[in-house]
Image: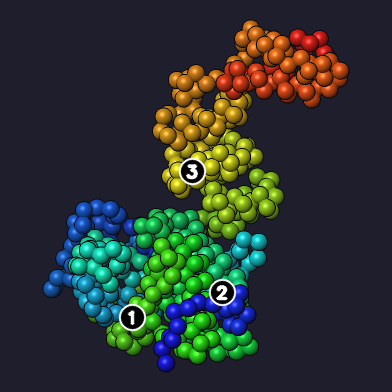
Amino acid sequence: MAAVTDEVLSFDEAMAAFDPVLGFEVHVELNTKTKMFSPAPNAFGDVPNTNVSPVCLGLPGVLPVVNGEAVEYSIKLGLALNCQIAETCRFARKNYFYPDTPKNFQTSQYDEPIAFDGWLDVELEDGTVFRVEIERAHMEEDAGKLTHVGGASGRIQDAAYSLVDYNRAGVPLVEIVTKPIVGAGERAPELARAYVTAIRDIVKNLDISDARMERGNVRCDANVSLMPKGSTTFGTRTETKNVNSTRAVAHAVTFEIQRQAAVLQSGGSIVQETRHWHEDTRTTTSGRPKSDADDYRYFPEPDLVPVHTTPEWIERLRAELPEPPAERRKRLKAEWGYSDEEFRDVVNAGVTEEIAATVEAGATASAARKWWMGEIARLANVAEKDIADLGVTPEHVVEIETLIGEKTINDKIAKQVLGFVAAGEGTPRQIVEAKGLAVVSDDGALTTAVQEAIEQNPGVVEKIKGGKLQAVGALIGPVMKATRGQADAARVREIVLEQLGVQE
């Protein structure tokens, strides 16, 4: 019996009755110069159907050639995921018809993947480490891209027609497949997000992918099934396809848990199927019945010889691996002197690399954290942009700190300057000079402003003369206002005390 309800249970109700079982298939587009089996360019955003070749288009009589760089990238990724690397592996034809696959089959790997039996330790927000077992990481080619035209949703269901762009057809991919993940419980959505984030960080760190999820460089198919509490028998799974943000992966897992729980509680059964993710409603809808491997009629690709690896080759690639992201984070935390909570906030805000680059450029770790987690993050939030796309660079932050150190500007002015930098108006120093934002430190101008503040605040003056030096702040405020926030506050304090004949 198929699903008998469109309702969902609350997440707490679902977790009280069921244990989730997860599985992820993460597709990573490699950033090689050319495609997996052809010399066509591998580039994003070009005019549709221009980065193609006879091989990409599946024309009769063409022969594929394996991209050697893509093989090395795949081995590096397998090593980073603690996988075993196959001594020999081969490609297979995965046969299915779809309009964005012009050959009517996808060249992939089936029973002989390049990497297998790995694991990845995933750190959750509170520092808990959850080990995810990796079943395989195999090489394949991407499909083209369909654009559905004429409907409100941009999806095939209500489109008048579809356009196909073969620029992406044949782009090198590695598909990373986990073993079933049990034991996550109510933290399943958090684990889903953390796992995909960790994969994205690894491939970006290896420099084998641009890792831009919004461009589809990293995409996740999220498998979810439920077991009644106390059961050890896996339920029927669904596969939510092509989720392209870490946040969306968590939401998709949450929704499927709630939806499946409602179906099972109402006496229905889960259909093994693919499902579409809808970001606007944070829901999934039915796609097509999920095919098993036999349905694809895999058979060895007759036009490609097997790939053979050697221990020397693998060890050379292993030696080229950069410091793993998790180990690097531990090192940076110690070097920067951040507390556990401070560093966790930095990681969750996604500004680790920006802070690292800022420190490397000459700023202190505390100053880098202050600006990236403070004013720059606020500006990005207001602009509704990723912080990396705001236009503020580590070099800008270092220049801000230099100007503060020179007493050319203060923190208040620095915030204004960063706003102008984000607006594309120049470097911090250029902006300060062009807009006359330098701190007023001329004693003549400051003394005049202090005398006016003293005359207008006799009650405050009496408190200061009576020994309440903290009241000086009540005079600094008017001076700062009179100088548009550009006065040197420390010098203003000194002049106030001098004018009143009071000693510290």
Q: According to the image, label 1 marks what residue?
A: 288
For this rendering, which residue is in front, 316 or 147?
Answer: 147
Q: Are the residues flagged by discs 2 and 3 in contact, CB closer than 8 Å?
A: no
Amino acid residing under circle 3: Val
In terms of sequence position, does the residue under pointer 3 or pointer 1 come before the other?
1
Secondary structure of the residue carrying tag 1 is strand
Amino acid residing under circle 2: Ser
Disc 3 to disc 1, C-alpha distance: 40 Å
In terms of sequence position, does the residue under pointer 2 or pointer 3 come before the other?
2
Q: Which of the numbered marks, if any, corresponds to residue 10? A: 2
Residue occupying image coordinates x 61% and y 74%: 12
Q: Quadrant of the C terminus?
A: top right
In terms of sequence position, does the residue under pointer 1 or pointer 2 come before the other?
2
Other residues around mark 3 within 10 Å, as few (<14) / some (14–19) / many (≥20): few
- Nearer to us of marks 3 and 1 is 3
Residue 231 in the image: x percent, y percent?
A: 60, 89
Q: Answer yes or no: is residue 445 visible.
A: yes
Q: According to the image, label 3 marks what residue?
A: 382
Residue occupying image coordinates x 45% and y 43%: 383
Secondary structure of the residue carrying tag 2 is loop
Residue 491 in the image: x percent, y percent?
A: 69, 17
Residue 142 in the image: x percent, y percent?
A: 31, 67
Disc 2 to disc 3, C-alpha distance: 32 Å
Residue occupying image coordinates x 66% and y 49%: 342
